[in-house]
Image (cartoon, rainbow, N blue to C red):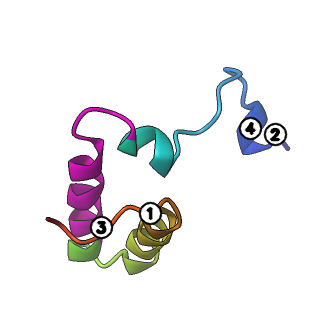
Amino acid sequence: MTSPSTRASGTRPISVADIAAQSDGIRALHRRIDELRSTGMNFAADAITKEMLALGISPDQP
């Protein structure tokens, strides 16, 4: 089995930190959390929220 860090393409998964570093990345993360919660995928929204908190980024929209 191939681990996520050694995928066939040789690239690693995009992290919350990668997204946050992009222009409007934090806004995109907020939108994604809202989308996930609206479809009942709270576990995924919670995972993003926890990563944002670990990075010192408020998961609450400004």
In whole angstroms, how far apart are the C-alphas of marks 1 and 3?
21 Å
Label 3 sits on what residue type? Leu
Which tag, 2 or 3, sits closer to the chain's start?
2
Q: Residue 41's quadrant in the figure?
A: bottom left
Q: Secondary structure at mark 4?
A: helix
Please tell me whether mark 2 or mark 3 is closer to you in this view. 3
Specify whether residue 30 is painted magenta. yes
Q: Which residue occupies the extreme front position in the image? A: 56
Main SS of the magenta part reads: helix
- Which type of secondary structure does the marked residue at label 3 adopt? helix
Say which residue appears at 72% left-offset and 31% top-offset.
7
Where is the N terminus found, in terms of image quarters? top right
**Callouts 1 and 3 close, C-beta under 8 Å:** no
Residue at image position (14%, 65%) is 62
Q: What separation in Å lies between label 1 and label 4 (alpha carbons)? A: 24 Å
Q: State the mark number for residue 2.
A: 2
